[in-house]
Amino acid sequence: RLLREKYPGVPVVTYVNTSAAVKAESDICCTSANAVKIVESLGVPRVIMIPDEFLAKNVAAQTKVEVIAWAGHCEVHERFTVDDIERFRLLYPGVVVLAHPECPPEVVKAADFTGSTAGMIDYVGEKRPSRVVLITECSMSDNVAVQFPDIEFVRPCQRCPHMKRITLENIRRALETMTHEVTVDPEIAPRARRAIERMLEVK
């Protein structure tokens, strides 16, 4: 709301990994995979993009649309540095560096490829590098390595404490006890749904 007051009439693009309350205040949602397409689909000279500053800046580098960013960061991706990438290249000659777009712009620039989680998986599957490092949450490398056992995955372990709370045991317990019900305020739900539906309408 503060950003809307500061930039009246400028549409708000919100990363899909936000609360329903935030989505309800937005014009449209995006993912890390479709963010550029969503921004350009609005046909406006500038947009507000929340909550991740680095995703917004990396999108801005790929479009002529002015992207106004909010100063939020992913606590995992913001920890990666160019020095990390240089160290990986030194310790693991020939390593291919894939970075998530929530990383700082200088890290994205130093990588060989930047893309969403799905984009990185597709890259590995298509290019089949002999050695690769995924600049993202460390469990991602574990998951992708199962799909490609012939590829060496360098694991720069930055753990997400929130993702680590999601375990099979916790899921089973929740289903067995039917606890942790997720509810959305009925006044918020339709507005949040509209922002998601608008994203899904973009081809």
Image (tube, rainbow, N blue to C red):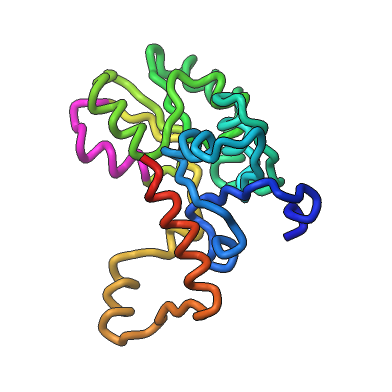
Which residue range is magenta in the image? 140-151
Query: Residue 89, image x and y in percent?
Result: 47, 16
Where residue 77 sits, quadrant-wise, is top right
- Name the residue: 74% across, 52% down: 3
Q: Position of residue 98 (x, y in %)?
A: 42, 27
In this picture, residue 94 sits left or right of residue 159: left
The quadrant in which the N terminus is found is bottom right
Is 201 in front, or is 68? 201
Q: Is residue 111 visible?
A: yes
Indicate left or right for 106 with 165 as reference.
right
**Quarter occupied by the C terminus:** top left
Query: Is residue 24 placed above or below 42 in the rendered structure?
Result: below
Q: Residue at x 80, y 50 (%)?
A: 6
Name the foreground residue: 15 vs 130. Answer: 15
Looking at the image, residue 149 sits to the left or right of residue 178; the answer is left
Quadrant for residue 128, please give it. Answer: top left
- Identify which residue is drawn at 19% across, 26% down: 150
Query: From this viewpoint, which residue is outermost toward the bottom?
Result: 177
Give the image quarter of residue 168.
bottom left
The magenta stretch spans residue 146: yes
Q: Camera-side residue: 199 or 156?
A: 199
Kindly identify the residue that appears in the image at 71 percent across and 49 percent down: 9
What's the magenta bit mostly, secondary-structure-wise? helix
Estimate the x, y position of residue 111 in percent, counting from the top left.
Answer: 49, 21
